[in-house]
Amino acid sequence: MYKLKVIKSKKDKIEFVKSQKLFYLNNQNFIVPYIKDRLNLIDTEKNPFYNHSEIELYLCYDEDDNIVGRIAAIVNTNHNILHNDKVGFFGFFECINNQDVANILFKTAEQWLKNKGMEYIRGPVNPSMNDENSFLYENFDDLPYILMPYNPKYYNELAENYGFYKAKDLYAYKLTTENFATDKMVRLYDNLIKRYKITIRNINLKNNSQFKEDIKLIKEIYNKAWELNWGFVKLTDDEIDFFANDLKLIAEESLAFFIYSDNKIVGFHLALPDYNQVFKYNKTGNTLETLWNLITKKNKINRCRIIILGILPEYRNKGIDAVMYMESGLRAKKLGYIEGEASWILEDNEMMNRGLTTTMNAKLYKKYRIYEKRII
């Protein structure tokens, strides 16, 4: 009744990417992906993630050759080395609301991973935890922020019915620039800056040589700050360069900054303008349309997403993270933004979850879920 196709050719990969919008017809919260960007994600020659890892892509068709689902099976070798695991991953999952189709997709990915020696299957990751990941689990009524996933609610049911169970929940918090800090934080802000002799420097997007040095510094902070986090995998030099090329195109300089204490590097903060407010007008996801909407509708952006807040381990528990959030809010307000999202944050990251709610008037408004299952 259903048939699977292994995706190898460039033509098939384009079909794989374009097929995503078939599952969201008339859904106003779905963002049609920028095709070139999504192709780069699964390009085993261009994306340096595949210098150390593997991926297999599948499309599922019904008897009339209509696409009814897709999935990727992924082995992240660096993850398994770092965590001493035998965990494989699934990603890029889309499916009609049909358990038989979902079972075929999950089973196919599971079998491929089993053949690679994996003992667990986890996901979704697209294709790693450093990229878009998880299923949206709560609050399906909002437009997703940039680089955050969106899916129908029934995806969770399909996964759970197959035998997946919760591995970890990820949280997203909403903040407003009108009321982004508690009175306590406002009082502490100046005192913390004086106490730790804090200075702030924006990333340099205009000078290429300085930008390269800044990217090296980001990599150092990122790999140290998240080293003990669940699911974390260090970025390689090639991966950080791959990330940097995209960053330079979409970053707002004042929202990407380093923080120093007594002239010593402490951490890095990155918030991105929410370009989904522009890309929501895309119908096809081709380059010309995407650029046109970017040029003509950029003034519609009035929110941002805090995507990275990394503090070196030796400077934690000092309140410096709250200073970074406060600075982010002040800068976002100056740009005319009215709200922002801090995401994603591990459910058991008590320090950040507590700090956001007690000092930043942040509201937990979305949850995402990573699933796992033992391979039989």
Image (cartoon, rainbow, N blue to C red):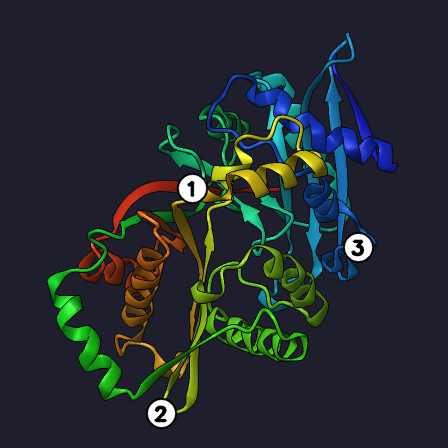
Choose between 293 and 59: the one closer to the eye. 293
Which kind of residue does numbered mark 2 sit on? Answer: Asp
Which kind of residue does numbered mark 3 sit on? Answer: Lys
- Residue 148: where, in percent of width, then height? 49, 44
The picture quadrant where one finds residue 354 is bottom left
Choose between 59 and 85: the one closer to the eye. 59
Q: CA distance from mark 2 to mark 1?
A: 38 Å
Reading the image, the residue beneath label 3 is 46
Query: Considering only vertical position in the picture, is 271 above or below 240?
Result: above
- Which labelled disc corresponds to residue 368? 1
Q: Residues within 10 Å of mark 1 (few under 14, many from 20)?
A: many
Q: Residue at x 56, y 78 (%)?
A: 217
Q: Residue at x 59, y 60 (%)?
A: 247
Q: Residue at x 58, y 69 (%)?
A: 205
Compared across the picture, whether 98 is left or right of 286 comes to: left
Reading the image, the residue beneath label 2 is 262
Q: Residues within 10 Å of mark 3 (few under 14, many from 20)?
A: few
> Is the Cβ of the residue at disc 2 closer than 8 Å to that at disc 3?
no
Compared across the picture, whether 48 is left or right of 222 comes to: right
At numbered mark 2, what does the secondary structure look like: helix, strand or loop? loop
Compared across the picture, whether 23 is left or right of 318 comes to: right
Q: Residues within 10 Å of mark 2 (few under 14, many from 20)?
A: few
Q: CA distance from mark 1 to mark 3?
A: 29 Å
- Residue 94: where, in percent of width, then height? 61, 28
- Residue 246: where, in percent of width, then height? 64, 57
Say which label, 1 or 3, has the lower sequence index: 3
Q: Residue at x 35, y 92 (%)?
A: 262
